[in-house]
């Protein structure tokens, strides 16, 4: 018996429908299932492109996407946009004027790194990466600090509307008052957020390692910071 075939089949059927509505010919059958894994064959109007892999993580009831077998960059970009659509990860367009921010923290070998990347549509406009001296809050501190840097950058550049995509719930809950900050970094974070009332912040939680490429970039920057 293939583990989690039902979950993968239900999700895969919806994903294939979205792919086929975006000029692909996507399909799978019973031979494409493995434990925790579904392979989907992809073609465009001219040629076979290869297979993408969808993984299921039962502990989080989440899915992740691997496209490394697809060599056509335009196809990969389109597949990723389809993935964002099925997961509700769509980003604002450039014409909206709303900056899309992705933040993350990392804790590697006793070192805490932070990473953030800011997009306007698909155009990357700024990124941050570095290491914190205080490692007591581990990766969570890195993610909080990345938002502090983003908000300071927004104030300097007169950016008044952003969406912050985060993994650690404290990013939103400290800001909205649902959680009370207890350590010095969380208190600094709350103070900075409160001082940015002129910036309209939209909060959105995106779990790490679920296939959002912009979110993956923030993760990569945070890991690079921890390894400095």
Image (cartoon, grey):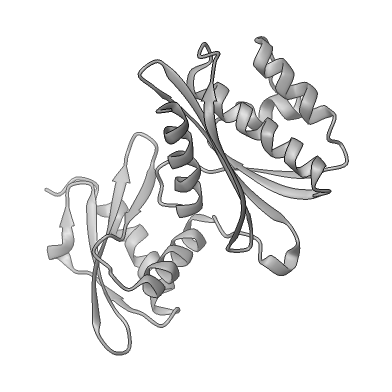
The residue shown at (43%, 35%) is 224
Please indicate whether residue 209 sits to the left or right of residue 132 in the image: left
Please indicate whether residue 197 sits to the left or right of residue 93 in the image: right
Residue in the foreground of this view, choosing between 202 and 56: 202
Residue pushed farthest front? 228
* Image vertical order of residue 168 relative to residue 132, above or below: below
Residue in the foreground of this view, choosing between 2 and 137: 137
Please indicate whether residue 55 sits to the left or right of residue 212 in the image: left
Q: Could you say where residue 227 lies in the image, as x and y percent from the top left?
A: 40, 28
Residue pushed farthest right? 198
The residue shown at (75%, 36%) is 152
Residue in the foreground of this view, choosing between 37 and 99: 99
* Image vertical order of residue 34 relative to residue 115, above or below: below
Please indicate whether residue 77 sits to the left or right of residue 57 in the image: right
How many marks the image carries: the answer is 0
* Image vertical order of residue 105 relative to residue 19, above or below: above
Residue pushed farthest bottom? 46
Q: Could you say where residue 162 lies in the image, as x and y percent from the top left?
A: 73, 49
Q: Could you say where residue 11 lies in the image, as x and y percent from the top left?
A: 36, 58
Whether residue 185 can be seen here: yes
The residue shown at (81%, 42%) is 156
Quarter holding residue 187 = top right
Q: Could you say where residue 220 lies in the image, as x and y percent from the top left?
A: 43, 41
Q: Quadrant of the C terminus?
A: top left
The residue shown at (34%, 55%) is 65
């Amino acid at each position: 018996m293939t583990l989690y075939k039902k979950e993968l089949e239900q999700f895969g059927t919806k994903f294939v429908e979205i792919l086929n509505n975006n000029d692909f010919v996507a399909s799978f059958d019973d031979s494409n299932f493995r434990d925790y894994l579904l392979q989907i064959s992809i073609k465009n109007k001219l040629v076979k492109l290869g297979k993408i892999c969808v993984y299921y993580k039962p502990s989080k009831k989440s899915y992740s996407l691997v496209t490394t077998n697809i060599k056509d960059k335009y196809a990969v970009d389109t597949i990723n946009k389809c993935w964002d659509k099925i997961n509700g990860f769509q980003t604002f367009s450039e014409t909206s004027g709303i900056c899309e921010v992705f933040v993350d923290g990392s804790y590697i070998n006793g070192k805490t790194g932070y990473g953030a990347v800011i997009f306007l549509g698909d155009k990357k406009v700024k990124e941050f990466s570095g290491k914190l001296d205080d490692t007591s809050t581990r990766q969570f501190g890195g993610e909080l600090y990345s938002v502090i840097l983003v908000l300071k950058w927004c104030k300097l550049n007169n950016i008044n509307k952003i969406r912050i995509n985060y993994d650690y719930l404290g990013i939103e809950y400290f800001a909205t008052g649902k959680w009370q900050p207890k350590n010095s970094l969380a208190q600094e974070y709350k103070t900075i957020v409160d001082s940015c009332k002129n910036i309209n912040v939209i909060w959105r939680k995106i779990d790490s390692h679920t296939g959002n490429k912009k979110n993956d970039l923030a993760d990569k920057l945070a890991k690079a910071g921890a390894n400095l």
